[in-house]
Image: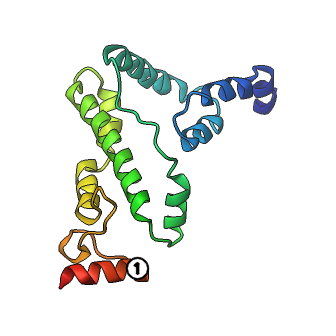
């Protein structure tokens, strides 16, 4: 029997559709829908981390997940060379802060959850990224001075942003 046939017989698509309805973002929903069964050799390691994750979630009353704007389109355009708007940076910062909080929670229980800790340690220093965004964009969405921040200015600043940042340098 082919994997595709087994996938249909077991109605995996309908299970994934149901699971995706709980996703907080469109990006999460798409990720769930693209999930495919693990191979027999990968299954033990997947089950081990799933067991740790389940135990961790049972112990923690709530995680700082947030239902924010879906920033996947903005990030995809940024990867193609478009600059992010101020509001998009603020949304990104909020996502980073949420992930950073979850990372800290996992780190505080590291001895109990070594597999989760391993995954958490693969994340970069999220707090510094959020701080750097704060250095450039105020909560009011006003551009702060790029030249004093740790983030270099984008190469193609829109004229409106260029005027705002030049006036602040004077």
Does residue 70 appear left or right of residue 158 in this picture?
Answer: right
Residue 123's place in the image compared with 43, above or below, is below
Does residue 156 appear in the picture of this structure? no
- x then y, percent, for residue 164: 31, 78
Q: Which residue is mark 1?
A: 160
Snapshot quadrant of residue 30: top right
Does residue 35 appear left or right of residue 12 in this picture?
Answer: left
- x then y, percent, for residue 34: 64, 39
- x then y, percent, for residue 72: 53, 52
Identify the residue at horizontal 38%, vertical 19% (top origin).
57
- x then y, percent, for residue 84: 44, 65
Identify the residue at horizontal 28%, vertical 74% (top origin).
152
Residue 39's place in the image compared with 141, above or below, is above
Does residue 161 appear left or right of residue 169 in this picture?
Answer: right
Decide which of 76, 44 is in the foreground and name it.
Answer: 76
Does residue 7 appear in the picture of this structure? yes
Decide which of 49, 139 is in the foreground and name it.
Answer: 139
Of helix, strand and loop, which one carries label 1?
A: helix
Identify the residue at horizontal 46%, vertical 37% (top origin).
67
Decide which of 26, 160 is in the foreground and name it.
Answer: 160
Residue 150's place in the image compared with 58, above or below, is below
| Quarter of the rendering occupied by the C terminus | bottom left
Snapshot quadrant of residue 165: bottom left
Decide which of 132, 50 is in the foreground and name it.
Answer: 132
Could you classify mark 1 by the number of other residues whose Cα lies within 10 Å: few (under 14), some (14-19), or many (20 or more)? few
| Quarter of the rendering occupied by the N terminus | top right
């Amino acid at each position: 029997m082919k994997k595709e046939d087994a996938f249909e017989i077991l109605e995996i698509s309908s299970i994934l559709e149901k699971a995706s309805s709980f996703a907080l973002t469109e990006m999460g929903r798409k990720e769930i829908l693209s999930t495919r069964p693990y191979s027999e050799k990968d299954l033990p390691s997947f089950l081990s981390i799933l067991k740790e994750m389940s135990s961790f979630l049972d112990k923690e009353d709530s995680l700082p997940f947030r239902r924010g704007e879906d920033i996947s389109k903005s990030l995809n355009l940024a990867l193609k060379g478009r600059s992010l708007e101020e509001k998009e940076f603020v949304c990104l910062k909020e996502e980073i802060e949420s992930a950073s909080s979850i990372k800290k929670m996992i780190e505080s229980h590291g001895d109990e959850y070594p597999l989760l800790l391993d995954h958490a340690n693969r994340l970069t220093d999220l707090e510094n990224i959020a701080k750097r965004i704060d250095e450039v964009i105020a909560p009011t969405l006003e551009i702060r001075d790029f030249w004093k921040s740790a983030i270099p200015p984008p190469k193609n600043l829109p004229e409106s942003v260029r005027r705002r940042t030049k006036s602040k340098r004077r």
